[in-house]
């Protein structure tokens, strides 16, 4: 374990590198040096040393390898439970078949080796958007309450963390089909999973979601126009709207459907 001391530039994000191959850590460090928004405060070559390094340096970001025999990068995450804020995790691996699992856990992004400089720049920009505000750690990635997230608008490719009790998933903004207001909560309908209840307001989502995709068609409903698959009239006053990769349709009132037609 090698903890480095550094003078942090304004608003720099503290990061550590975890990889069992020193040359690959050096490779990634050199590319990250082109991004003053991030400063490397330490390196580790296995899970146990990473646990100790996290405790010593309290990083905001972990660039984490997956295969580190006899360890596995995924094994690190349960050992960090209870950290507040939980650091953002970016998996860096030569094996792209780990991508799905990476986004099912506390992962902000996923990079394949060798890391291309343009792809790394996208990751750095994403980390900045998610972590630039006070108290906006990885555990508070863009899907959480408005008091925990940056105010900059989200983009279609950005990942948001959706959690409802023990159910957790990451989803791209563009795959969110609809957001429904339910009192102090919003119900998020996203492709490939069940609806998730989030404690936040519909106005918060309206301000954050990209306007080129989402339209507010009533006081309680935002709809992603590009995720609409089919509409089915139930009569004069109701219409069912089916979305891509979502089993259950939404039922719109006559007024809601009329407003939706204006946008589509």
Image (cartoon, rainbow, N blue to C red):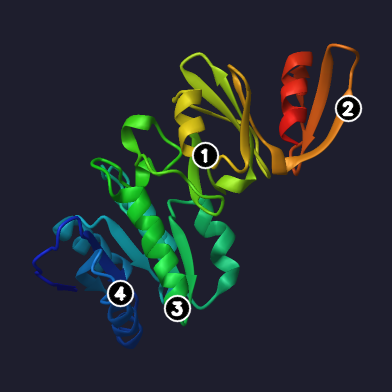
| Distance of label 3 from label 4 (alpha carbons) | 11 Å
Residue 171's x, y, as percent?
A: 56, 47
Residue 263's x, y, as percent?
A: 71, 33
Q: Taking the image as drawn, is residue 165 in sight?
A: no
Q: Residue at x 15, y 58 (%)?
A: 10
Q: Taking the image as drawn, is residue 41 in sight?
A: yes
Whichever of callouts 1 and 4 sits on the residue coming sooner in the sequence is: 4
- SS for callout 3: loop
Whichever of callouts 2 and 1 sits on the residue coming sooner in the sequence is: 1
Q: Residue at x 74, y 29 (%)?
A: 262
Residue bearing the label numbered 3: 115
Residue bearing the label numbered 2: 232
Residue bearing the label numbered 4: 32
Q: Which corner quadrant of the image does residue 212 belong to?
A: top right
Residue bearing the label numbered 1: 209
Whichever of callouts 3 and 1 sits on the residue coming sooner in the sequence is: 3
- SS for callout 2: strand
Whichever of callouts 3 and 4 sits on the residue coming sooner in the sequence is: 4
Residue depth check, mark 2 versus mark 3: number of the one nearer the observer: 2
């Amino acid at each position: 374990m090698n903890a480095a001391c550094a003078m942090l530039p304004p608003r720099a994000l503290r990061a550590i590198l975890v990889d069992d191959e020193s040359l690959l850590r050096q490779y990634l460090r050199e590319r990250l040096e082109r991004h003053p928004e991030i400063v490397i405060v330490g390196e580790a070559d296995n899970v146990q040393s990473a646990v100790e390094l996290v405790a010593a340096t309290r990083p905001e970001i972990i660039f984490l390898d997956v295969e580190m025999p006899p360890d596995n990068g995924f094994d690190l995450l349960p050992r960090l439970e209870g950290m507040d804020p939980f650091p953002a995790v970016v998996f860096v691996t030569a094996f792209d078949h780990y991508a799905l699992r990476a986004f099912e856990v506390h992962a902000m992004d996923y990079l394949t080796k060798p890391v291309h400089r343009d792809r790394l720049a996208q990751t750095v920009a994403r980390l900045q958007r998610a972590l630039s505000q006070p108290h906006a750690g990885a555990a508070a990635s863009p899907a959480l309450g408005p008091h925990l997230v940056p105010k900059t608008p989200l983009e279609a490719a950005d990942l948001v963390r959706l959690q409802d009790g023990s159910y957790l998933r990451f989803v791209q903004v563009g795959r969110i089909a609809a957001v429904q207001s339910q009192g102090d909560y919003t119900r998020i309908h996203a492709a490939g999973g069940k609806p998730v209840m989030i404690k936040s307001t519909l106005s918060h989502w309206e301000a954050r979601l990209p306007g080129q995709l989402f339209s507010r068609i009533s006081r309680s409903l935002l709809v992603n126009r590009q995720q609409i698959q089919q509409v089915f009239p139930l009569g004069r006053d109701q219409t069912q709207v089916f979305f891509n990769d979502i089993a259950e349709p939404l039922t719109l009132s006559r007024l809601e459907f009329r407003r939706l037609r204006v946008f589509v």
